[in-house]
Amino acid sequence: MLGLRRRSLEPPDCTKVQSTPRSCQHAGRRGREGVPEVRPGPVPRRDCPLTFPFPRWEAGFGSRSVSAANPLPLFTVRSSLFTLLIVPAHFLSIASTPTPALLDMLRRAVALRATRCTLLSGLTLACLFEKSSLRTRVSFEQAMRRLGGTAMTLMPFEIGIGQRESPEDIARVLAGMVDAIMARVTSHDTLERMAKVSSVPVINGLSDLAHPAQALADMLTLADEFSPADPAGLKGRTVVFVGDGNNVARSLAVACGKLGVRFIMSGPPGYALGADWLASARARVPTLELTNEPDPRKAVEHADAIYCDTFVSMGQESERSNRLAAFAGYQVNAALLARAPSHAIVMHCLPAHRGEEITDEVIDGPRSRVFQQAHNRLHAQAGLLAELLKPGKKQGATEVSGDEDRVG
């Protein structure tokens, strides 16, 4: 970490270039551990690219990491020659989250489940919503409070993402006032645009492409059922997703692939996970074992968990009649459940349209884990926030990678 004084809230002066340690006035003298001490100076010129690093982040000079073992050279910064990069770790998709980090989040969720602490004391999460929410809003707000932090919610009429202000401007403003941004948005492009300019972590609360926060809770629910001691023990299990190959299905499939869980997609032609997406997902996650089985009765024969979601998602209301006709044979009901192994559980990300994708008998039955799954949103989000914002966290593990992040 850079040897920055925490009370310094302004960046060092980069309006002058000093090339030697003797003449350098703003890189400062070396501290006891050989880390340069940076003194605050005037606000830099408008064209200066220097972004002031907060103490818990790792800074990089180009491709070079800056730490106590690899201290920053004694120089200041000229915009035409150098750029000091601060790269926060974002959580935009399961695909861009390394498997060890995914397991750390799940294990931390288990460890924090029955506790309240001050781990994130003094930190604030801004929650932005373009789409309505129950579980996402409550889980993130409560998770921050349980960890000692605070959360604020901003609704569409207050900020107008892409209308009143651009995603980039919103991210830059919030990054100077809060410690992380969670956004539930219509387009995944909005998240990527925010993440590219934000100096604080950006978290995907839902987008048209992916729902990684939900996938964390899903894997936690599976671990509770089949491997309480360690989420890594889920390897070899089988999840069957009956319904639409949507953002929830994509994120869940990738999470299963990273943890060695077999994923079977059962949906009508034209609604299952497409061939192009499958190719990208397999390239991104080589351990992904995914099968398309259009017949749900065959698909569930070896299932450990049967997962369903609404046939008509937000924004698809105009397609309702066509979708209900296409999915007529894909309801999770007692007859379908009878074809699955007796230990198989039923999951649903909610909200449920009872009588359409799932029956009352199943969702309220003894094999349903739907409401435990909903409660796990709180614990999963606590694990996510604790790992992403924990003191001493070295940021930069997750990149904003454009096409590579278009998996889920």
Image (cartoon, rainbow, N blue to C red):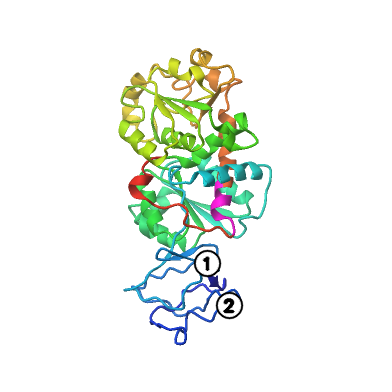
Closest to the observer, 36 or 332: 36
Percent of width and height locating residue 278: 35, 33
Badge 2 element: loop
10 Å crowding of disc 1: few (<14), some (14-19), many (20+): some
Closest to the observer, 203 or 291: 291
Dividing the picture into quarters, in which one does residue 277 lie? top left
Sooner in the amino-acid sequence: mark 1 or mark 2: 2
The residue lying at 51 percent from left, 81 percent from top is: 28
Dividing the picture into quarters, in which one does residue 78 lie? bottom left
Q: Quadrant of the C terminus?
A: top left
Amino acid on which disc 1 is placed: Ser
Q: Residue furthest bottom?
A: 23
The residue lying at 38 percent from left, 17 percent from top is: 328
Q: Which residue is mark 2?
A: 31
Residue 137 appears left or right of 321: right
Percent of width and height locating residue 272: 36, 27
Determine if the magenta segment contains residue 265.
Answer: no
Q: Which residue is mark 1?
A: 67
Q: Quadrant of the N terminus?
A: bottom right
Task: Name the mark on residue 313.
Answer: none
10 Å crowding of disc 2: few (<14), some (14-19), many (20+): few
| Residue 260 can be seen in this image | yes
* Span highlighted in magenta in the image: 384-391
